[in-house]
Image (spheres, coloured by chain):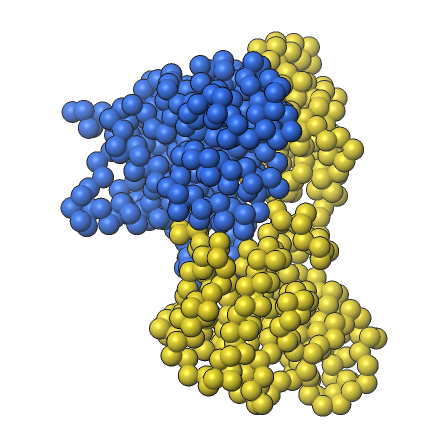
Amino acid sequence: MKLKEFEGKQLFQKVGIIVSKGTVIRSVSEIQEFSGSRLLKVQTIAGGRGKAGGIILVNNSKEAKEKAAEFLGQEFLGEKITEIVLDEKIDIKKELYLGLLFNTKKRVPVFIFSTEGGVEIEELQLNSPEKIKLQEIDILTGLTDEDCDILLDGSSLGSDVTLQLKVVMNQLWKCFTEFDCKMLEVNPLVITGDDKLVAVDSVIVLDDDANYRREIKFPKRLDGREKTAREIAANKIDENDPKGVAGKTYLDLDGDIGVLTSGGGASMTLMDALLEFGGKAANFTEYSGDPTREKVQKLTRVVLGKENLSGLLVAGAIANFTNIKETLTGVADILVEKKPDYPIVIRRAGPYDQEAKIMLANVKKEHGLDIHYFDEKIPMTKAAEMMVELSNKYKQEKIAKSVGAEQ
Amino acid sequence: MSILIDENTKFIIQGITGKQGTRSTIDMLASGSKLVAGVTPGKGGQQVEGVPVFNSIKEAQEIVGEINCSVVMVPPRFAKGAVVEAIEAGILLINIITENIPIHDMAECLKLAKEKNVRIIGATSAGIYSVGKSKCGPVASGKSKIALSKGSVGIISRSGGMSCETALVLTQAELGQSTIVSIGSDVLMGSTFKEIVELFENDSETKGIVLFGEIGGTSEEDLAEWLLKRRELGNLFTKPIVAFISGKFAENLGVQNVSLGHAGAIIEGTKGTREGKVKALKEAGVIIAEYHHKVAELMKKELELKNN
């Protein structure tokens, strides 16, 4: 999870790094009277807020209130803004860049340092890559004096600042390891007029897999957009029923083919195949890990609740242990209830798939549903191809029918 | 031959008394794997499906003798301890099935493994399957075994479920498999495409390699870079490689690998996107399948070309 600037600075402070003095503002009325310059900083998860006009110099509280009102509760960089920070204006002598992250190729942590902070590091990489220093860190021994010396070699910052910088580097390493960060960045770390080091901004991505052992907690966030009613309904399915997963991820899309996939890699591969063969999905969702019939019923009801569908694709890779009959009975229950006239393509294989096949054949016959069931004899993505063909045919026939009715 | 594991490999499961461990025990035994022991601290002396359970790997080694591969199926918070124990016990191949291991724990395990020359597959691996010889982990368990057939195509997959499905489409095209390796999809992987491709190169039984890649990370690009370098050095990689890289839909949706942010760009540049991966692999001579089941047809063509 990515933190906002003020949250990241809380972690910096915990390891002793000095940060710029700021006040978090959640409503305009919280802004107290002041005069003199401050920086109004919009708190976003997305990067690039400075360039987008999210960092503004204000000269008194009246200006601050006016500007704050423009942002709070409004959309900015695709996010609904809930906080701004009024930050002290710092006397800047020089700006530095410090970062820590993992190199996925070498599989080691890397410390990044540059004496040219303040600009985006990608920009620096492009224009003056020689000014970026990288040092791989041995995670078993931790950051050493030697690592710091290598990073600081040739930076000519004077012995006093250099000494302070080494302290900050060690504090950052502590922050990185103690709070299980996937990456962190201070840009800029400012050298003030009186040679003090102050962190003015923060970027931190926490490792969610380590949430259990991190004492400090941050509120969970949505990724900007508000959820639709169907998305909320789907996400609720797993509540109070821990057997398997159904609807944990659900996205409303603007196509016309309803989708029920199973398995992470398989679900992505199926969505890719629909796209490749020219089909448009009405949603994306997934169930896996042998969920109950009831949970699959609920998820199917959400998927079929969309108007103007032209097909339903139920598919997954060959299953190790998900009971195919039980889960597909959950799908069939809702098909019987709603009796859609569009084609339904099912590709599932695994335990009890032959029983599922018989069950679906009966449902098809009894209720006149257009079900096409395939087991492992047809590749999963081939079923997606068939779905697109059948859905196109269905749409053409529907148009032909409506034209016929008009004439 | 085959890679990593064969009919002589002696396995141990760490976390054997858990639900997943027990399920894998039944399946590994049914597949003919030599599962000689299991470990669950505090449960030494018990048995799971006739396999003796020990409190530690050391104890197990004293009783059952040599162990070649440990299959880690403990909960994520105990994973680092389990892996360190296996490394210190001198086991040279560790297959981590556990998901959601903290990245700092994984980095420590990988550093230690490197120092001790231990190979790690995973985490978040669905296992390894040398067809007709032995297997470990949940890959192609129970009924899904029908997807496999013995032959000469190696599979490396970042997706667990799709490793078996990839075998299935190959089987349907009458292309059998040598070894299937599920490498997982974590930010830090024990073994990447490149490392497993190298193993397949030295395996006389393997004639071609199929990859299942995903967006995020640099494992596909790293392989491409290595293949290109080989070409430049006049040491061309000669076994055909066919890859399917998923993520078209995700990228269309605007879901990107944002986890590494700005600093990530310094290390990885524009790597990580499907487009970038496909381009790099194509330039390195890898054949790309635009939809998944096409991998079989493309591999068949490549192998026929080679035989003529």
- Residue at 54% over, 24% down: B38
The yellow-tinted chain is: A
Q: Nearer the viewer, residue B169 or B209?
A: B209
In the image, taking residue B188 as reference, residue A180 lies left or right, namely right
- Across and down, in percent, residue B25 comes to 54, 20
* Residue B139 in the image: above or below residue B196: above
- Across and down, in percent, residue B256 comes to 52, 52
- Across and down, in percent, residue A312 comes to 60, 28
- Across and down, in percent, residue A357 comes to 59, 12
Q: Nearer the viewer, residue B41 or A376?
A: B41
- Residue at 58% over, 84% down: A196
In this orientation, does residue B279 appear?
no
- Residue at 40% over, 51% down: A105
For this orientation, the residue located farthest to the right is A29
* Residue A88 in the image: above or below residue B113: below
The blue-tinted chain is: B
* Residue A129 in the image: above or below residue B86: below
